[in-house]
């Protein structure tokens, strides 16, 4: 059986997504390596504290919590909160990473948001993994969490009619504990600098950055995770980054984010069929200035090498036009099922 496929492809065999005993043994060994760190996280973490110093509010059994990180993401916050509220999220748990815009004030005013801050920066917190695992310990194991960034918008089939509670019920019925979803980069239909995303709560980012690549990806299977690579960042910049993430997961005693959020532990849970997509938004007016700030602050992996690569493509990224023969205008989440980006989990009636 081939170990890689063109993606999206609506007819991938189910056997491709299943793991084997060797990955399971690696997962057990990795769990042992990270057990001491999980024990430390179970105690109060002095590097993470509530913004207003109030004790954290306990979650109810029927809550659907969302954990996310924020750094100068004020423009995204109104649409981000509106999108996930529409999916049924009842509590937002945010770590603000030293924002200098109005993000902290905006989030603190939202009654369903718990705002946390840290003396560490993103890089020192293992690119945020330390914060996320600390929050999973504080708010409780043995429950489902949405786990995303402020520029990632999860969609799945019929998500406007089927809230996250129904998706979770369906995943549990299928024995799936993590929702696999690739980050698909969206971009405007023209020079990036001509398209401003202001953060108006009535405007969703896909109404400004309307297009994505409908081809030019590949899907493979390593010993620890599915791998999706490609899209406009590879097409334009030659950047070959791992796109698969797990934006919805059941967190229990065995779980760890390990060395990367792209392949959490235990590894054997990382091979479910892809049934969601993260609409991912990086490219609006002002992109060059944003990427220069990211490159200079030294918080991202490899000294922000990926962002420096993109900045080196041309003097001003705002003049860049991503549109190509593979560009496709976003219609709705169900169209991405038809195109093969994700599978349907729902039985045909």
Image: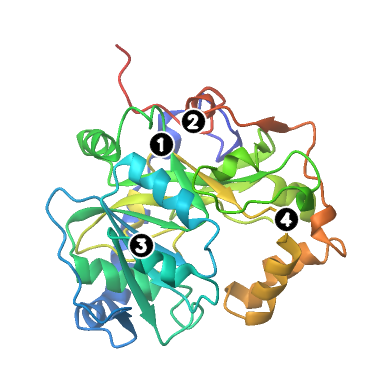
Q: Is residue 213 above or below residue 111?
A: above
Mark 3 to mark 2 CA distance (whole Å): 35 Å
Label 1: few (<14), some or many (≥20) within 10 Å? many
* Residue 34: numbered disc: none
At 63% from the left and 55% from the top, the residue drawn is: 282
Nearest-to-viewer mark from 2 and 4: 4
Q: Which residue is mark 1?
A: 273
Return the disc, 3 or 2, that comes first in the chain's sequence.
3
How far is the residue under mark 1 from the one under mark 2?
Answer: 17 Å
Label for residue 285?
4
Disc sitting over residue 333 in the figure: 2
Is residue 348 or residue 212 the one in the foreground? 212
Residue at label 3? 26
Judged by depth in the image, the label closer to the viewer, 3 or 4, is 4
- Of marks 3 and 4, which one's residue comes earlier in the chain? 3
Q: Position of residue 130 (x, y in %)?
A: 37, 75
The quadrant of the image that shows the C terminus is: top left
Answer yes or no: do the residues labelled 3 and 4 have beta carbons within 8 Å? no
Count residues near mark 4 (Cα–Cα under 10 Å), then give few for <14, some for 14-19, many for 20+.
Answer: many
Q: CA distance from mark 2 to mark 4?
A: 25 Å
Where disc 2 sits, the SS reads helix
Q: In front: mark 1 or mark 3?
A: 1
Secondary structure, mark 3, is helix
Front-most of residues 184 and 283:
283
Q: Position of residue 48 (x, y in %)?
A: 32, 81
Q: Secondary structure at mark 1?
A: loop
Where residue 33 sits: x, y (%)?
Answer: 32, 76
Q: CA distance from mark 1 to mark 3?
A: 21 Å
């Amino acid at each position: 059986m081939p170990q890689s496929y063109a993606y999206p492809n609506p007819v991938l065999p189910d056997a491709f997504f299943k793991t084997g005993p060797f990955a399971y043994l690696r997962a057990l060994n990795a769990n042992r390596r990270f057990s001491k760190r999980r024990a430390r996280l179970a105690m109060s973490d002095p590097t993470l504290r509530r913004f207003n110093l109030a004790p954290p509010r306990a979650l109810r059994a029927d809550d659907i919590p969302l954990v996310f990180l924020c750094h100068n993401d004020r423009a995204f916050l109104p649409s981000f909160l509106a999108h996930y509220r529409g999916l049924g999220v009842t509590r937002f748990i945010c770590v603000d990473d030293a924002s200098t815009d109005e993000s902290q004030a905006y989030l603190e005013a939202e009654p369903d948001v718990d705002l946390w801050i840290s003396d560490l920066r993103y890089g020192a917190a293992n690119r945020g993994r330390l914060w996320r695992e600390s929050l999973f310990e504080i708010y409780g194991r043995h429950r489902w969490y949405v786990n995303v960034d402020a520029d990632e918008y999860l969609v799945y089939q019929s998500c406007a009619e089927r809230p996250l509670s129904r998706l979770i019920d369906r995943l549990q019925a299928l024995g799936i504990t993590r929702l696999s979803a690739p980050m698909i980069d969206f971009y405007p239909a023209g020079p990036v600098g001509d398209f401003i995303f202001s953060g108006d709560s009535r405007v969703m980012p896909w109404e400004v950055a309307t297009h994505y690549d409908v081809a030019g990806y590949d899907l493979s299977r390593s010993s620890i995770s599915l791998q999706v690579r490609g899209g406009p960042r590879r097409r334009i910049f030659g950047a070959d980054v791992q796109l698969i993430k797990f934006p919805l997961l059941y967190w229990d005693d065995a779980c760890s984010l390990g060395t990367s959020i792209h392949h959490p532990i235990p590894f054997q849970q990382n091979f479910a069929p892809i049934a969601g997509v993260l609409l991912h938004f990086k490219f609006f007016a002002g992109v060059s200035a944003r990427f220069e700030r990211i490159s200079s602050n030294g918080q991202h992996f490899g000294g922000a090498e990926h962002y420096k690569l993109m900045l080196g493509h041309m003097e001003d990224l705002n003049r860049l036009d991503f549109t190509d023969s593979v560009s496709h205008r976003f219609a709705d989440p169900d169209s991405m099922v038809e195109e093969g980006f994700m599978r349907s989990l729902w039985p045909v009636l």
